[in-house]
Image (cartoon, rainbow, N blue to C red):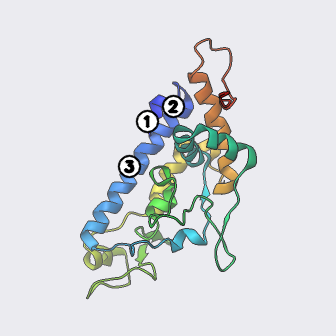
């Protein structure tokens, strides 16, 4: 997904470039922790998405929207117009609407997935005293001698490296656009208006007359 190709120069483009850089650093931190600890999710497991809908900030929704617009603009228009419904799990618990059952990797927007999805199962949390603690997901296998949880100074000794801290990256995320920090919404509510914002800006970039964006999906050709 090339942000420069889809969006013209704008505050939106700069914000999403900064968000992509933050995501890249979070991914590297997770990779380092996984390599040191030997921990990993069971292949094909998607339980964290099946009964969970992430609450995300507007910038996170816009990056997912950009992903959808770049890959299939017609589908993006349909989602913006009709919205998304949460996935219903077998237990009836609502889950992520972008979850896919037809692939063992499950996420249909993996490259643009929100921060919590990137760090989930491989990040620590801080308590009110600033102490970092990490616990393995209940479904995550651990090798002999690997504890199921550890905290503070014991993290590196227990897992070979300290895991990234969710709250630290979350604070950086909120700082990218402080004015929208209170605008966190469930993904299925945040995404349709984000798609419209991205479509508007993408339309400006494709209109050389600059007399307004083209917001109409392409009409089918007569045969």
| Image-quadrant location for residue 147 | bottom left
Q: Position of residue 38 (x, y in %)?
A: 27, 73
Is any atom of residue 32 visible in this view?
A: yes
Find the residue positioned furthest to the front: 223
Between marks 1 and 3 in the image, the one whose residue lies nearer the viewer? 1
Q: Residue at x 50, y 71 (%)?
A: 46
Specify which label sits upstream in the sequence, 3 or 2: 2
Q: Position of residue 211 (x, y in %)?
A: 68, 14
In the picture, measured across the screen, residue 182 lies left or right of residue 12, that is right
Q: Secondary structure at mark 1?
A: loop
Circle 2 packing at 10 Å, graded few (<14), some (14-19), many (20+), is many
Q: Secondary structure at mark 2?
A: helix
Q: Which mark is residue 24?
A: 3
Q: Give the alpha-carbon distance from disc 2 to disc 1, as whole Å.
A: 7 Å
Looking at the picture, does residue 11 appear above or below residue 44? Answer: above
Circle 3 packing at 10 Å, graded few (<14), some (14-19), many (20+), is few
Question: Residue at label 1?
Answer: 2
Circle 1 packing at 10 Å, graded few (<14), some (14-19), many (20+), is few
């Amino acid at each position: 997904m090339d942000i420069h190709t889809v969006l013209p120069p704008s505050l939106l483009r700069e914000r999403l470039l900064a968000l992509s850089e933050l995501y890249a650093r979070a991914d590297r931190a997770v990779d380092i922790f996984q390599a040191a600890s030997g921990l990993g999710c069971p292949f094909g497991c998607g339980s964290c998405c099946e009964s969970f809908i992430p609450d995300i900030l507007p910038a996170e929704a816009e990056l997912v929207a950009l992903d959808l617009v770049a890959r299939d603009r017609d589908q993006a228009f349909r989602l913006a117009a009709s919205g998304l419904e949460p996935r219903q799990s077998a237990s009836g618990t609502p889950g992520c609407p972008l979850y896919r059952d037809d692939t063992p990797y499950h996420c249909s927007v993996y490259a643009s997935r929100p921060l919590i999805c990137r760090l989930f199962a491989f990040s620590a949390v801080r308590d009110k005293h600033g102490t970092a603690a990490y616990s393995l997901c209940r479904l995550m296998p651990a090798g002999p001698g690997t504890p199921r949880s550890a905290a503070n100074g014991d993290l590196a000794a227990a897992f070979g490296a300290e895991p990234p801290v969710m709250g630290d990256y979350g604070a950086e995320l909120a700082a990218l656009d402080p004015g929208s920090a209170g605008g966190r919404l469930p993904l299925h509510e945040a995404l349709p208006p984000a798609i419209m914002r991205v479509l508007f800006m993408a339309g400006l970039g494709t209109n050389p007359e600059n007399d307004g964006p083209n917001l109409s999906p392409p009409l089918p050709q007569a045969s």
